[in-house]
Amino acid sequence: MDAMTGLASGPVRRNAVDRERVPACDMIRYVADDEGRVVPDLAGKLPGRGVWLAASRDAVVLAVRRNVFARELRRKVVADPGLADRVEALLLRRCLQQLSLARRAGQLVAGFDQVAAALSADTAGGRSGGVLVLARDAAADAERLRRAARGRVVLSAFSREDMGRQIGRDALVYASMEGGAIAAKLVAEARKLRGFRDFEMIIPDRRSPGHEGGTTKEGKSRTQ
């Protein structure tokens, strides 16, 4: 997987619902706890036999409905009908945590004017990468930032209140994160979250110099 864009290039695993081979970076592992309850292993580190599903609400719903977890884990388990909602909430929390981490690391710029200045400086310096994070209800002037964010992932997945809480504010609408490990983690988690909720996420295509493409909120390839 490309560290910044999250584009798949690494190992693949079998999706237990439809048996299709899916890039591991676009999948979520599930295990059974000591009481036999199915729990998501978002970090992929919990012990025991695991079940891999595509990172999507449909995959989880079908797995629960078809008793896939019991079949794959080879034991009696309890799969909560609300498992998909739980996964969405956990992924959302993991995404938002990256904003807080970036702020503490000095890698996050907050506020419209500050973000615009940072993007302009990056363009002048020939720098690309990083993530432009916009609140889901950002005003129309956010389009100016989108145009200035060439070479960056554009993510509009969170409420302004959720964003604000990560940096000690009541609300935050515009933020820019420097490229690096924290930004890459945000992109990776957001790619999975997109399978559970609808939001805008544009990923630049860096495989073709001079060509900018991306991935829309529907997860389809886009060429501009």
Image: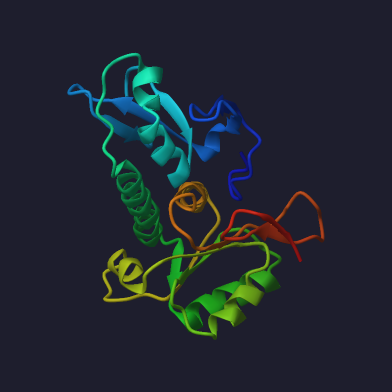
Q: Is 152 rendered above or below residue 76?
A: below
Q: Which residue is located at x 43 percent, y 78 percent?
A: 111
Above/below status of 181 relative to 218: above
If the image is split into quadrants, where does the N terminus sit? Answer: top right
Residue 123 at x, y percent in the picture? 68, 71
Question: Left or right of 77: which side holds 3?
Answer: right
Q: Quadrant of residue 167?
A: bottom left
Horizontal placement of 9 versus 170: left or right?
right
The residue lying toward the viewer, choosing from 139 and 108, is 139
Where is residue 157? Give x, y as percent.
45, 63
Name the residue: 54% across, 30% down.
Answer: 18
Q: Residue furthest left?
A: 35
Q: How is the image coloured?
A: rainbow
Question: Considering depth in this image, is 222 or 142 the residue closer to the camera?
Answer: 222
Quadrant of the rendering where the C terminus is positioned: bottom right
Q: Position of residue 2 (x, y in %)?
A: 63, 43
Q: Nearer the viewer, residue 127 or 15?
A: 15
Residue occupying the point 75% across, 61% down: 212
Q: Is residue 221 above or below residue 82?
A: below
Total labels: the figure holds 0
Residue furthest to the front in view is 66
Left or right: 154 in relation to 105 = right
Q: Residue 219 placed where, x, y %?
A: 60, 53
